[in-house]
Image: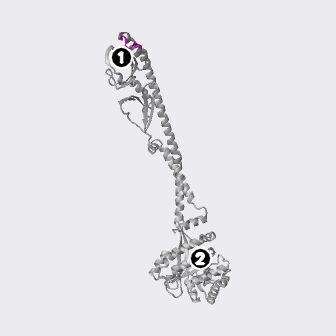
C-alpha cells in the first residue's frame, strides 16, 4: 500500500470541498441573475411589441375613420367628393392622401381631383391593406393604403409610412420592432419585402384583432458567459474573488491539524519520519560493527525535529508502532543490500505500545527475514522509561523473539528500577550502559563504579554490552579495557541520514582507530 494514499485522499477531498465552496457565490448568484435578466428582457420585448401594436392600431383607426367617412362617396361624382377627400387629409391625423375607386381604378384623388390609375384589389391583404416602399409622388417614402370596399367601389386613406416608422422607433428600445403586412415589413428607418432582418432565436408576435397586420420582434439570447462579462464584469470578478478566498480559507482550515496527535498522524501519512543511523564499533576492530536506528521527523516547515520532542506523544497515542514499522521497513530495504560486517548489531528502540500491540513478532520476523542475507542481528532496545508489565504473554513473546534470533537489550540500563527484574524474568540478550554513567568516566568516581559493576554483571550473566554516549578517547579506552562489547557515541560518529550511512559503508574505511 502506498503510504501517501490516505493523505492524498484527504487532500483531494479537502480540495474538492474547497472548490465547491469557492464556486458557491458564483453558482448561487449567476444563474438567478441570468434567469432574472432573461425574464426582464422577455417582458420588456413583449411590452415593446404590445405598445407597437397599440400605436399602429391607433394610427390605422384614424385612416379607418377617414375611409369610413369617404366610402359613401365612392362611385359618385369626383367633383362633389374632392372637397371631402381633401378635408379628411386635413383633419385626420397621419392620413397623407385619400382616393376613391371604381373597381380597381382610382378615379378621384385628394391630390389631383379627377384622375385615372390602377390600384388592383389583389395587392391588398384581405382586400384592406397594402404596404409599399413609395409611390409616384414620393418614391422613397413608404406608405400604407387603407381601403374600405362597398360593392365594386372603394375609399382609400393613405397613411404616411414615416409616422408608422416613428411609432415603431418609439417602441424599439432594446430590440427593433417591425410592422408586417402580408410579405411587406416596415421598421425604424427601414422597409423591405420577404424575410425580416435580424431574425433571432426568440420571436414575439402580436396580430392585430382589428386590422390585417402584425407587429413582431425577435432577438437572440446572448451566451451567458459573454453576457456576464460584458454586463457584469465587476460583479463577476467580485464573486470569483469572494469564492476563491472562501475556498482557500476553507482549504487551509481543513488542512490544519487539530492537535499535535493529528499533526503526527498527518506526518505519518506523509512519510515524514525517517531513520537516522548512528554507527557502533567493537573495540579493536577497524570498521563499523553495528548501528542504532534513531528516528527523525523531517517536518515540511520546521525542518528536522529531534525524537525527544515527539516520541513521548507518539508513544502516548500509540502512533509510535506504525511510525517504527514504516521507518524500519524503509531502513531495512536499503540495509539488506549492503555488505555488512558479520554479526552486525542493528539496534532499534521499541516502545511498550509495540510490545502490547500484538504485531511486534510478525514485524520482527519480516525484518529478520530482510536482514538474513546480510548476517546482521536485529536488537530491540527497550527503554526503562516505559515500564512493561511482565505477563505470561510478554515472557512468551521474548522467548519467541529469541528463537527467531532477535536480541532484546535493556536501554538506559540502571536509570530505572525495573532493569534487574527484567533481567531475572525475561529472555534478554544484552544491555546498554546509559550515557549519563559513561559521561562520568574519568571525572565522577561513582559513575565509573557503576559502569564497572554493570560490565561485570553483564559478563557474569553472559549479556552483550553496549556503551552509549562515548564522547572522548579516554572513555573509549576505558570501556574497551573493561571489555564492553560495543561502543557508540559522538567520538565514533554522530547519527547520520540513511543514505549517508549506506554511502559510507559502501566506500569502506568507516572507522579509523
Ligand atoms: N550527548 C550525546 N548524545 C549521544 C551520543 N551518542 C549518541 N547520542 C544520542 O543519544 C541518544 C541515544 O538513543 P536512546 O538512548 O535510545 O534515546 C533515544 C530514544 O529513547 C528515543 N528514540 C529515538 N529514536 C526512537 C525510535 O525510533 N523509537 C523510539 N521508541 N524511541 C526513539 O529518543 C531518544 C533520543 O534520541 P536521539 O536524540 O537520537 O539521541 C540519541 C543519540 O543521538 C554522544 O556521544 N553524546
Query: Could you tell me if residue 332 is visible in this image?
Result: yes
Query: Could you tell me if residue 437 is visible in this image?
Result: no
The CB of the residue at mark 2 lies under 8 Å from ligand 1:
no
Q: Is residue 108 above or below residue 205?
A: above
Q: Is residue 94 above or below residue 41?
A: above
| Residue 217 within the magenta-colored segment of the rendering | no
Which residue sits furthest front? 151
Looking at the image, which is closer to me, 244 or 75? 75
User: Where does the magenta region start and end?
Assistant: 72-77
> Would you say 73 lies left or right of 422 here?
left
Quadrant in the picture for residue 211: top left
Mark whose residue sits in front, 1 or 2: 1
Q: Position of residue 336 (x, y in %)?
A: 49, 79
Q: Position of residue 406 (x, y in %)?
A: 57, 82
Q: Position of residue 419 (x, y in %)?
A: 66, 82
Q: Position of residue 66 (x, y in %)?
A: 42, 17
Element under label 2? helix
> Would you say 234 lies left or right of 440 here?
left
Give the label on residue 360, or none.
2
Q: Is residue 101 above or below residue 307?
A: above
Q: How is the image coloured?
A: one colour
Q: Is residue 188 above or below residue 437?
A: above
Spatial CA distance of label 1 from label 2 is 117 Å
Query: What is the crowding at mark 1: few (fewer than 14 residues within 10 Å), some, or many (at least 20)?
Result: many
Where is mark 1, residue-wise?
101
Q: Earlier in the sequence, mark 1 or mark 2?
A: 1
**Magenta region, main secondary structure:** loop
Amino acid at each position: 500500500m502506498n503510504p501517501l494514499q490516505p493523505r492524498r485522499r484527504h487532500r483531494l477531498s479537502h480540495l474538492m470541498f474547497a472548490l465547491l465552496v469557492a464556486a458557491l457565490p458564483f453558482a448561487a448568484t449567476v444563474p438567478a441573475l441570468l434567469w432574472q435578466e432573461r425574464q426582464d428582457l422577455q417582458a420588456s420585448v413583449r411590452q415593446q411589441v404590445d405598445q407597437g401594436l397599440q400605436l399602429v392600431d391607433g394610427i390605422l383607426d384614424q385612416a379607418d375613420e377617414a375611409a369610413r367617412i369617404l366610402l359613401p362617396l365612392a362611385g359618385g361624382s369626383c367633383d362633389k367628393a374632392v372637397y371631402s377627400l381633401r378635408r379628411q387629409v386635413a383633419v385626420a391625423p397621419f392620413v397623407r392622401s385619400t382616393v376613391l375607386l371604381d373597381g380597381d381604378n382610382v378615379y378621384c384623388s385628394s391630390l389631383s381631383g379627377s384622375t385615372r390609375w390602377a390600384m388592383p384589389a389583389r395587392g391588398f391583404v384581405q382586400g384592406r391593406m397594402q404596404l409599399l416602399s413609395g409611390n409616384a409622388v414620393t418614391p422613397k417614402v413608404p406608405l400604407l393604403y387603407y381601403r374600405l370596399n362597398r360593392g365594386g367601389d372603394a375609399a382609400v386613406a393613405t397613411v404616411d409610412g414615416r409616422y408608422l416608422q416613428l411609432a415603431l422607433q418609439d417602441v424599439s428600445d432594446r430590440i427593433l420592432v417591425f410592422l408586417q403586412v402580408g410579405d411587406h415589413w416596415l421598421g425604424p428607418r427601414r422597409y423591405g419585402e420577404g424575410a425580416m432582418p435580424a431574425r433571432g432565436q426568440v420571436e414575439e408576435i402580436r396580430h392585430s384583432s382589428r386590422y390585417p397586420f402584425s407587429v413582431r420582434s425577435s432577438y437572440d439570447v446572448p451566451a451567458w458567459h459573454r453576457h456576464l462579462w460584458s454586463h457584469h464584469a465587476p460583479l463577476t470578478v467580485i464573486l470569483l474573488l469572494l469564492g476563491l478566498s472562501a475556498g482557500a480559507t476553507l482549504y487551509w482550515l481543513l488542512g490544519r491539524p487539530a492537535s499535535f496527535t493529528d499533526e503526527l498522524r498527518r506526518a505519518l501519512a506523509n512519510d515524514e519520519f525517517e531513520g537516522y543511523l548512528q554507527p557502533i564499533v567493537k573495540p579493536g576492530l577497524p570498521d563499523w560493527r553495528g548501528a542504532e536506528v534513531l528516528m527523525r521527523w523531517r517536518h515540511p516547515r520546521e525542518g528536522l525535529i529531534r525524537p525527544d520532542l515527539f516520541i513521548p506523544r507518539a508513544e502516548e497515542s500509540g502512533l509510535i508502532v506504525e511510525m517504527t514499522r514504516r521507518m524500519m521497513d524503509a531502513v531495512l530495504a536499503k540495509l539488506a543490500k549492503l555488505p555488512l560486517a558479520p554479526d552486525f548489531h542493528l539496534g532499534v528502540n521499541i516502545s511498550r505500545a509495540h510490545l502490547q500491540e500484538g504485531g511486534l513478532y510478525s514485524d520482527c520476523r519480516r525484518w529478520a527475514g530482510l536482514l538474513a542475507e546480510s548476517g546482521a542481528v536485529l536488537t530491540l532496545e527497550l527503554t526503562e522509561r516505559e515500564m512493561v508489565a511482565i505477563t505470561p504473554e510478554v515472557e512468551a513473546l521474548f522467548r519467541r523473539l529469541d528463537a527467531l534470533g532477535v536480541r532484546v537489550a535493556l536501554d538506559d540500563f540502571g536509570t530505572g528500577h525495573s532493569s534487574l527484574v527484567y533481567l531475572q524474568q525475561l529472555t534478554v540478550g544484552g544491555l546498554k550502559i546509559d550515557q549519563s554513567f559513561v559521561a562520568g568516566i574519568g571525572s565522577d568516581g561513582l559513575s565509573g563504579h557503576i559502569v564497572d559493576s554493570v560490565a561485570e554483571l553483564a559478563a557474569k550473566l553472559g549479556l552483550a554490552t553496549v556503551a552509549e554516549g562515548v564522547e572522548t578517547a579516554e572513555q573509549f579506552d576505558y570501556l574497551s579495557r573493561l571489555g564492553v562489547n560495543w561502543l557508540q557515541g559522538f567520538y565514533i560518529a554522530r547519527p547520520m541520514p540513511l543514505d549517508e550511512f549506506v554511502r559510507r559503508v559502501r566506500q569502506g574505511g568507516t572507522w579509523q582507530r
